[in-house]
Amino acid sequence: MQGAVAEPSALPESRLIGRIPVRNIWLLFLFASNLARFHGQYAAEVEESPDFPSLIARLLCYAVDRRLRRNLSRGYQQREAALTRVRGRIDVLRTFSNDLLGKGMIACRFEEFTFDTPRNRLVRAALDALSRRVDDPLLGHECARLAGDLGRQGVGGLKPSRAALSADRLGRHDADDLLMVTLAKLVYELVLPTEDAGGHAMSRVDKDEVLVRRLFEKAIGNFYKAELATRGWSVHQGKSLPWQIEYLTARAEGLFPGMVSDIILENKALGRRLVIDTKFTSVFGQSQHREAVLKSGYIYQLYTYLRSQERADDPLSLSAAGMFLHPVVGGDLDESVRIQGHEIRFVTVDLLQPTSAVLNRLKQLIPMGT
């Protein structure tokens, strides 16, 4: 991540991820995971954690310990058993084929409460994984202890499948599980990416880049959704943009690329539409005669996004603006150009700054009121 000359950091290297302070990685995680309600909490843990895996381990331990003290969530499990009394539904075929009545028993199918749910198995598996990865022996021991406590409650140690997790959806009454389960998912999705992500084990640098890129791209859209949704703005993420095609050959139909925007902000009362493209790479390239120039490919891309959507029956499309939003470490850029009625803005947000400064920067980029 470049785009401006980086200033040397005053923080130790272990407190940085891709040269970004752990506190700001945590900020990106909260917004990327729709957990903005937890912003401002766990400040001590965030500041004391030497790296992001340690932070996730500390908070996951806290969340699991809290759930164990307040009763771990349970779910229903389908069971079949031969019983001495009727429970649930009678399995008539099995009862008679096994001559259970002569033994004073009945084959039954029933549901029972269990702690061995997909979400709890995910949490236990994440704790087991972290216990072997964190550098702090005491923290690793705490992860192992809590994993053992879950095991003694009957929670299995194998990580559940994606299908099982999808079926175990978090509802409104599961708010106490939200942080715990989201942290456990993050362990596998970002903190400990391995061969599953790309066919080979990743280096520390690769992991850092994947972590920050994924968090940044998702966090920006969710931040603006949280800030603007109640202020007259509509926020769209990952919206497909149609080409205004007048003619297309048969083969071209299968070859023509689609267009998907990162973020679109729209306020009809203000007569504004803004297309935001988040880029993790540098905003600058090089030319033969200049050391730093705005990357032409980015300009072409956003220009196409804007001009291809112009329609006479959509007034906002005729004056829509575009913005490239890049993360940098130590630097500042905010430059604009107007091309055929469309403003295109190149902006950076410095992730080396304090968390409050990062949030203020993002807020200042968009008029919040109507």
Image: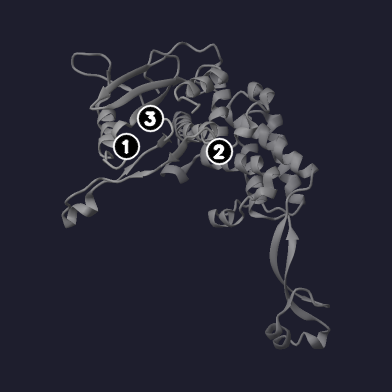
Which amino acid, mark 3? Lys
345 vs 173: above or below: above
Q: Nearer the viewer, residue 267 or 362?
A: 267
Disc with the residue nearer the chain's start (3 vs 1): 3
**Nearest the camera: 305 or 332?**
305
Question: Which residue is rendered at x = 22% and y = 54% of the image?
Answer: 253
Give the CA separation, mark 2 to mark 3. Answer: 19 Å
Kindly identify the amino acid type of the residue bearing the numbered disc 2. Answer: Ser
Q: Is residue 36 left or right of residue 286?
A: right
Crowd class of label 1 (few under 14; some 14 to 19; many from 20; radius 10 Å): some
Tag 3 secondary structure: loop
Q: Read off the residue under disc 2.
A: 33
The foreground one among 175 and 128 is: 175
Front disc: 1 or 2: 1
Which badge, 2 or 3, comes first in the chain's sequence?
A: 2
Categorize mark 3 by other alpha carbons within 10 Å: few (<14), some (14-19), many (20+). Answer: some
Instruction: Name the residue type under label 1.
Output: Pro
| Residue with the mark numbered 3 | 279
- Where residue 217 appears, x then y in whole percent? 44, 34
Task: State the separation of the CA atoms marked 3 and 1.
Answer: 28 Å
> Is there any visible trace of residue 201 in the rendered image?
no
Mark 1 and mark 2 residues within 8 Å of each other at the beta carbon = no
